[in-house]
Image: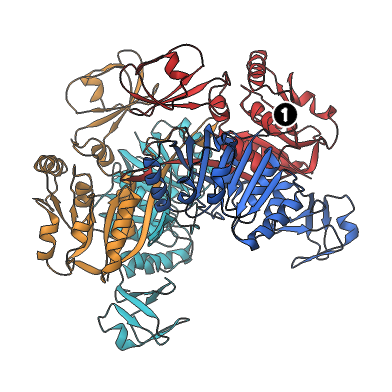
Chain colours: A orange, B cyan, C blue, D red
Amino acid sequence: MTNMKVLISKKTGNYYYYNGVGEYHCKEGFLTEEQLHSGENLVKNSKDREFLIFESNKHDQFQKIKRGPQIITEKDLGYIMARSGIDKTSSIVEAGGGSGGATTFFGRICDKVHTYEIREDHCKIIQSNIDKFGLDNVTLTHGDLAENIESMDKNSLDLLFLDMPEPNMVLEKNIDAVKSGRYVICYLPNVSQMIEVTKLIAEKQNLYVEEITEVQTRHWRVWERVSRPEFRSEQDFTAFLMFLRKL
Amino acid sequence: MTNMKVLISKKTGNYYYYNGVGEYHCKEGFLTEEQLHSGENLVKNSKDREFLIFESNKHDQFQKIKRGPQIITEKDLGYIMARSGIDKTSSIVEAGGGSGGATTFFGRICDKVHTYEIREDHCKIIQSNIDKFGLDNVTLTHGDLAENIESMDKNSLDLLFLDMPEPNMVLEKNIDAVKSGRYVICYLPNVSQMIEVTKLIAEKQNLYVEEITEVQTRHWRVWERVSRPEFRSEQDFTAFLMFLRKL
Amino acid sequence: MTNMKVLISKKTGNYYYYNGVGEYHCKEGFLTEEQLHSGENLVKNSKDREFLIFESNKHDQFQKIKRGPQIITEKDLGYIMARSGIDKTSSIVEAGGGSGGATTFFGRICDKVHTYEIREDHCKIIQSNIDKFGLDNVTLTHGDLAENIESMDKNSLDLLFLDMPEPNMVLEKNIDAVKSGRYVICYLPNVSQMIEVTKLIAEKQNLYVEEITEVQTRHWRVWERVSRPEFRSEQDFTAFLMFLRKL
Amino acid sequence: MTNMKVLISKKTGNYYYYNGVGEYHCKEGFLTEEQLHSGENLVKNSKDREFLIFESNKHDQFQKIKRGPQIITEKDLGYIMARSGIDKTSSIVEAGGGSGGATTFFGRICDKVHTYEIREDHCKIIQSNIDKFGLDNVTLTHGDLAENIESMDKNSLDLLFLDMPEPNMVLEKNIDAVKSGRYVICYLPNVSQMIEVTKLIAEKQNLYVEEITEVQTRHWRVWERVSRPEFRSEQDFTAFLMFLRKL
C-alpha cells in the first residue's frame, strides 16, 4: 500500500489510485510504467490528457482500506479524537470494529487500542487493515464487548468508543474500566437511539451526558471567478456523537 | 494542571474548574477542600446545590490553556489531523503559533513539531503552554517562517500548517521541505484571502488545491421530552481550511 | 405603526424603532423631532454620531408586533408558504395562533385565514396584531380546533397549519376539510413529537408524510477586507416542518 | 396544467406527473384511465404495485414549469418574500427573468409584477409559464432593466429583485423607483460578486447592506425506527441573497 500513487486527471478532476506496479489503464487512457516512475509530477497519457502524480498519504490509504461495513468518516474521527482529548498516551477500547476504519485511525494515534467485533467476516477485514497499516499496538478480539467490559482493569481506559446499534447492551454493565473524567462515545445515526441511551443514563449514577454533537463539513470551490460552496455535497449526514462522561 | 478537577452544577449546568488546592468558591456557593478530595462524585455545596466532580481530561486542559490570541477550535484541529493523515510518525511545521493551541495539540499527537511565531509576547504564552502539557518534542522559534522555510531539509515535513493572514508570504517561497503528496493547510477566515491564495497557486507548479472545507458542529439536547438541536450555538463560524497538496 | 421609522447607528450598527412622534432618545444620544421628520436619510445626533433613517417596511412591523408567546420566524413562514404553494387565492386554517405572527403573515398573503387559539390572553394579542396590520380577511376563534375541524366544509382548505405541541389531537379527527393534494403542516421543535405524528399517520389512510424539513439561515458579512459568515448567529434552531399531504 | 395529478409509488417513493389524459405508463408499469379518474387514492398498477394518487397543487406545478435556465428554488423565494415584507399589496420589478420561476411566484402573491429579460428565447419560456398560471398582473418586457430603471415612477416599487451576474449594471443607475425603506435584493452565487456589489454600495449614498443571507434546507426521514436527517441532500447550495435597503 505504501507504494500507491494518486493520479488526478486535470481535465476531469477524477482521482485514480495506482498500486505501484505496471501500466495504469483507466477510461481516460493509459500511463506507462516508465512515466509513472519517472519522478515527474505532470505527465500526458495516451490520449494526451495531463495527469498530476502524487505520492499517496495516509488519507488516501484510509480511503482505500478494504471494506465490508461502511467506515466512519474522517470528520467524525477527527472530532472524536480532538474533543475527547486522546493522544499518543491513550488506551482505547472500541466495539463494533466494522471494517477497521476507526481501529486503524486510533491505532495510528494512540498508545493501545483493543477492538471487539462479533462477526467473524468483519474480523478478517479488520485484521487485514491493521496489517496494511503495520500497527502492532492494536488487539482484535472476536467477541462481544458487553461480556468482556466488566473484567477489564478498573481505571484503565481513556476512551470507550461504541459504534453499535444498541449501546445500552454495554452501558448497562459496570464500566469502571473507564477512567474518571474520560468519555464513553456512542456513534448513533438515529435520534430515537439517543433517546434510548438517555433513558438508561438517567437511571445510572456514573455517566453524565456532556455533549451531543453532529459534525458537518462543507466543501468550497474557489478558482478564477468562482468562489462559493460546492453545489452538491457527497454526503449530508453520517451520525450523532454522544459524549458520556464517566464520573 | 493535572490536578485540576471539573465541577458541574446540576441546577445550572455551569462548569467550574478547580485547581486542586483549598476550597472552591463561586457564585453558586462553596465546596470544602475535604469534599473536593473525598473521592465522591456527587456532593452538595454550602447552598445545598448538587455538584458533579470529575477528574479533568486533556479537553478541559485545552479549554483552559493560557491565552493571548484566540486558539483554534477542536473541531478544526480534529479535521486537520484526520483529513491530512498525520499521526504519531509525523513531522510538522506550523507558523502563526498564536497561543499554542495548535502547537500543543500537534505536539500531543505527532512525532516532531516546530512552531514559528514572530511576536515575542506570543512566544512566551506558547512556551508556557508547551510546558504545561510537558511536551519535549516541540521546538519554538521566535521568527518568521518565510525566512526559514527554504533552509529546511527537503522532503522532511508531513504537514505545513499556516495560521496567518497572508500565507502567500510563505507559499511564494520554495517549499520543497514538504514531502510529495502531503499537505500545506491554510487556516483563513475570509473568502477574499482564499482568492488570493488561489491566484498564487495558479502560477506555481508544485501545489494543487485539493479541498477547501469548513467544519461545522451542531450541538443537540436530548433528555426527557426534549430531542432537538440547541436553540443557540456558541459559535457559528471560525475559518475555512484550504488543503494544498504538494506535488 | 405605519409611521414608524427605523434608525440605524452607523457606529454600532444598532437598530432603533421610532414611533413617529416627538424626539428619539437612546443610549447613543438623541435626535430631534425636526431631524427625524426632515426627510434627510443621514443625520448626526446629539453626540455627533451618524444615524441612517429609513421608512419602516412590513418586515420591521413584523419584528415589532406585540408578543406573548414566541412568534414564528420569517425563514419558516417563507418556506411554509413557498413549499405549500399557497397564494392570493388560498384559504387557510391555523391553530395555535400564539401571538399572531403566522396569522398576520398568512392574512397579508392569502384570501382567507381562520385562526383558532384556546387561550384568551393570546387571543387579545392576536386580535391587536390583526388590527395593526389592518387585515379584514382574518377570522379569530377563541376555541379548540380539534372540536371544530370536523364541522368545516369538505375540500375547503388549501392549508391547515398546526403550531401546537400535540397535533395528533387534530390529526386523529376527520380532516376532509383539507383539499386533496394540499398540505397539513405541523411545526414541531422535537424529533420525539415527529415520531408521535408518524405513528398516527401510519394508521390513517388519508395523509402521506411528503417532506420533513428544517430551514436554516446563515448570515454573512461582506465589506472592505471582510468576506465571511458571521461569527455568531442569533438563533441556530427553531423547529421542524412536517408536510403531510392529504390524499 | 390544473388537471395534472401526482402519482407516488409506495414501493419506490418515486413521483410521477400525470397530465390528466389517457393511461399512464412508466417503468414501474401502467395505470388505466379508469383507475386514474376513479377518485380512489390508492390503486394497484399493472405490476401489482400500489400507487398513491393526489390532485396536483401549485408546488407541483412550480416543479414542472417549462425550463430554460435554472429556476430559483422555493427556499430562496420564500425567504425573499417573507424577509422583504412583500404581500398582496406590493409592486415588484425583477430582472433576469430566466425561466419565469420567480416571475410566476411573485405574480401569484403580489399586486403587480414587471419582469425584464434580455434574451428573446427566455422571454418565450417566461410568457408560456405566466400563461400556464393564468396571471394577468404580470408584465414582461424583452429588454435591459438598466436602460429602463431611471424612467420608472419614483417611489413606486416595494421590491427590486436582481437575478443577474452583474447587478452593478443596475445599481450604478438612479434607483429612486424603489420606495424608501424597501429592498433591492441581489441573488448571487459567488462571494466575489458580493464583494463587487459592496464596493459600489460604499460609494453610493442611497443603499445600505442590511443583511446577506444564505438559506439552507435540510430534509429528515422519520418512520418506524428511523429518525435522522437524510443521508444525501439534493442540493447543498444555490446562492446568496443580498438585502440592500433603500434610504
Q: Is residue B132 above or below residue B164?
A: below
Q: Which of the image's four quarters has the N terminus of chain C?
A: bottom right
In this rendered view, identify the residue nearer to me: B171 or D18. D18
Mark yes or no: residue C118 visible: yes
In this rendered view, identify the residue nearer to me: B241 or B182. B241
Mark 1: give few (<14), some (14-19) or many (20+) Cα within 10 Å.
some
Q: How many badges with numbers are in the image?
A: 1
- Measuring from the top left, give residue B224's x and y in whole percent: 37, 62
Q: Is residue B60 above or below residue B84?
A: below
In this rendered view, identify the residue nearer to me: C124 or C194. C124
Horizontally, residue C115 falls left or right of residue B195, namely: right
- Measuring from the top left, give residue A71's x and y in whole percent: 25, 41
Q: What element carries label 1?
A: helix
- Measuring from the top left, give residue C149's x and y in whole percent: 55, 45
Residue type pointed to by label 1: Met
Give the residue drawn at x 22%, y 44%. Answer: A101
Q: In this view, does B49 lie above or below D135?
A: below
Mark yes or no: residue B136 visible: no
Report the chain holding disc 1.
Answer: D
Toward the top, the furthest residue is: D22
Give the residue drawn at x 40%, y 68%. Answer: B65
Residue bearing the label numbered 1: D169
In this rendered view, identify the residue nearer to me: D119 or B82. D119
Q: In this view, does A85 lie above or below C41?
A: below
Q: Quadrant of residue A167?
A: bottom left
Q: Quadrant of residue B132?
A: bottom left
Horizontally, residue D27 falls left or right of residue A25, namely: right
- Measuring from the top left, give residue D126's x and y in whole percent: 65, 19
